[in-house]
Amino acid sequence: MSLRRDPRARAVRPLVLLVDDEADILVALEDLLEDEFRVLSTTSPADALAILRREPDVSVIVSDQRMPGMNGDQFLSRARQHSDAQALLLTGYADLSAVVSAVNDGRISGYAHKPWEPAALLAMIRQAARRAELQDALRWERMLLQGLLDGSGDGVSIKDRDGRFLRLNRIAADRLGHEPSACLGRTEAELVPGTVGEAMLQADLRTMRNGAVATDQRQVAEDENRPASRGGRWLQRLRAPVRDADGSVAALATLERDISDEKAAEAQARQNEKMQALGTMAGGVAHDFNNLLTAVLGSLEMARNQVPPGEARLARLLDTAQAAADRGSALTQRLLRFSRQDDSRVGSFDVNELIGNMRDLLSRSVGRRDITIEYELAPSLSPVRADGEQLELALINLCVNARDAMPDGGRLVLCTTAAEVVLPEGDGPPPAAGVATRCVSIAVQDEGIGMSPELQQRIFEPFFTTKEIGRGTGLGLSTVYAFARQSGGMVLVDSAPGKGSRIAICLPSIG
């Protein structure tokens, strides 16, 4: 069945199709209607069907009942395959069965006897044309509404005053775990198990009672296909009362957006601000402490030169103080690197070559026979531009952390791959917003105890450590994070309790 044009674009005068096997009757009907309607007429029901196939704008069909070859009720029944125009039946004799057939199969909206009373018939056709206009308008409104529902990237629904679904799109239904048709006529309390569905229903009813737009946010089960939603997806729901002509709330429209990416961006921004503030503080402390250590180290050197021969015990005490001051100096340098207050040596290099030269160093750093270090290095990687020494330090930190996370031993895998990553704005060259950047990923993966989502939120904070006192400063992962961000890259963490951890440094590739 052809869809009529937008009713607002239709001709001002409705189109009426007249079907009668007597030409004189057609002439009389045309004279009656021509001032208010456009008129098409034919003496053949078969020709009338052909007209309906090519004229989708027919608003009203007026058909005689008794015609050779095809009666009016039969013609109107077949017409429904091509048109949903309003239909009127003209009959010159009382045939109740024909009228019943025309009502059931031809869906007529009225009938009149021959000879007809002109004013009554004209009024009947006017009413039928008006119904056709309203029918067109309703059909288009429904089509436009369905188009908006289906075309939206958000979950959209419309509910009645009791919170029952009247319309909803596929996205909204999928979030409820049902087909759209299964949701119609039911509330969220009936569709969502537990107290969550009842709470959403009560929020709907409360909004309709208050009559004001309301917005809330909720967290739902994690979607493993969305890395940005780790720990759960965040949905924001807007509820808007829909009012009828007298201003009363007649329905409720809801719009539910997935804001997981926005939440992740907010968390990243807060982390960046916190790291920047901590870096500034750490740099200031390190600078002042470095000045003190310079004086201490200089004094120790002078004191060593003045130790009398044979004062071995005093020499040992000075050596101990010297070693402690040297460790303090090394810690200071790490703080300065974290805060970017030292001069880094940036250059272009091949990551695989750098790792190849580190194998002996990494083995000594891990230093355990029950841990096997494996290398999975992708060939033909593009070079990166960064401070190679800082990358070496970052990899040592990651491998040592992986070692400590495997008290019972296991496999430690260091792998490199080419990756397309959407990088956040950082301290390096700003990436285009929302555009993936070609990167080299350098990952360290272990089979250790893993980390909870709460722990993952804190691992890059300076001085935060889960190790016992004396075994860690809490600067290892923070320097890894600072190095990646200062190089224009980022750090990705994939971990779960009991399932090990994978920490990847992603650096933009060049060339």
Image (cartoon, rainbow, N blue to C red):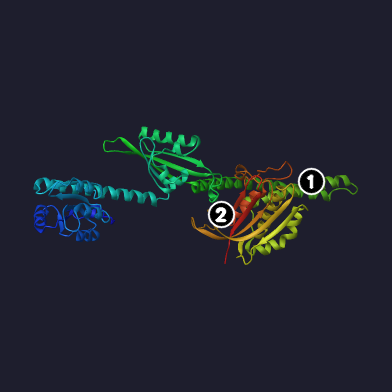
Residue 204, compared with residue 289, is above or below; it is above
Residue 56 is drawn in which quadrant? Answer: bottom left
- Which of 322 and 57 lies nearest the eye of the viewer? 57
- Quadrant of the rendering where the C terminus is positioned: bottom right
Q: Look at label 1 and name its amino acid.
A: Ala
Q: Does residue 52 appear to the left or right of 346 in the view shown?
A: left
Q: Does residue 504 appear to the left or right of 1 in the view shown?
A: right
Q: Nearer the viewer, mark 2 or mark 1?
A: 2
- Could you say where residue 23 lies in the image, as x and y percent from the top left? 10, 59
Residue 23, compared with residue 246, is above or below; it is below
Which residue ends up furthest to the right in the rendered image?
310
Q: CA distance from mark 2 to mark 1?
A: 38 Å
Q: Residues within 10 Å of mark 2 (few under 14, many from 20)?
A: some
The label on residue 427 is 2
- Which of 57 and 355 lies nearest the eye of the viewer? 57
Q: Look at label 2 and name its amino acid.
A: Asp
Q: Residues within 10 Å of mark 1 (few under 14, many from 20)?
A: some
- Could you say where residue 80 lies in the image, as x and y percent from the top left? 26, 53
- Could you say where residue 419 lies in the image, as x and y percent from the top left? 57, 60
- Tell me, yes or no, if residue 343 can be seen here: no
- Label 2's element? loop
Q: Earlier in the sequence, mark 2 or mark 1?
A: 1
Q: Does residue 382 appear to the left or right of 30 in the view shown?
A: right
- Which of 200 and 448 lies nearest the eye of the viewer? 200
The label on residue 321 is 1
- Label 1's element? helix
- Quadrant of the rendering where the N terminus is positioned: bottom left
Residue 267 is drawn in which quadrant? Answer: top right
Q: Does residue 124 appear to the left or right of 9 in the view shown?
A: left
